[in-house]
Amino acid sequence: MVDIRHRVGITTDPHRVYDALATSKGLAQWWTTDVEGDAAPGETLRFFFGGPDASASFEVVEQDPAGRVQWRCVGGPEDWVGTDVVFDIRTSGEETVLQFAHANWREPTEFMGHCSTKWAYFLLGLKSGLEGGTFTAYPDEVKISSWG
């Protein structure tokens, strides 16, 4: 199994980072504006990227206000199903550190490389928005290739 991993330092309160990751409203600011479902553990969130065929569904596995959000992909791109998305939040000096993993891919693929770049882009948009700049959620993000 292989993982996508990113680390981003954000100059804001860790509770603001948590709220951006643990609520539908927060997620719609920085990943995709079209989010459905309940963000509570045991519930399912569905994210849309231009239509029902371009979507992903995640079971909410864990939400800990002390610093962790975890999802398991239950529908969407074949390469994603069964993978886990984990956000770990901690304070380090003057910043809040967000450690991100999209874990347990079966193998490294070209699509995984695309997703790694897109995750980095969206996480930097999260940082920007929380620091007073602009969020860059789909559909207003930069398209990195013909895949989106």
Image (cartoon, helix red, strand yellow):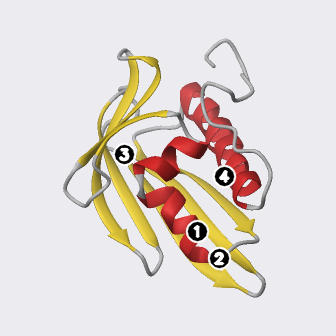
Instruction: Give the residue furthest to the bottom.
Output: 93
Q: Distance between the residues labelled 1 and 4?
A: 11 Å
User: Tag 1, which secondary structure?
Assistant: helix
Residue named by callout 4: 126
Residue named by callout 1: 16
The tag on residue 64 is none
Q: Distance between the residues labelled 2 and 1?
A: 6 Å
Residue drawn at 58 percent across, 68 percent down: 16
The tag on residue 13 is 2
Residue drawn at 41 percent across, 48 percent down: 24
Q: Do the residues labelled 3 and 4 touch (CB within 8 Å)?
A: no
Amino acid bearing label 3: Thr
User: Tag 4, which secondary structure?
Assistant: helix
Looking at the image, is mark 4 or mark 2 earlier in the sequence?
2
How crowded pointer 1 is (Cα within 10 Å; few <14, some 14-19, many 20+) is rated as few
135 shown above or below 99: above
Q: Position of residue 11 (x, y in %)?
A: 76, 71
Looking at the image, is mark 2 or mark 3 earlier in the sequence?
2
Q: Do the residues labelled 1 and 4 touch (CB within 8 Å)?
A: no
Residue 1 appears in the figure: no
Would you say 55 lies left or right of 126 here? left
94 shown above or below 116: below
Q: Are marks 2 and 1 in contact (CB under 8 Å)?
A: yes
Instruction: Give the residue furthest to the top.
Output: 146
Residue drawn at 75 percent across, 27 percent down: 142
Is label 3 or label 1 in front?
1
Amino acid bearing label 1: Arg
Q: Nearest the camera: 133 or 68?
A: 133
Amino acid bearing label 4: Leu
Q: Where is residue 70 in the image (x, y as percent from the top left)?
A: 38, 60
Is label 2 or label 3 in front?
2
Residue named by callout 3: 83
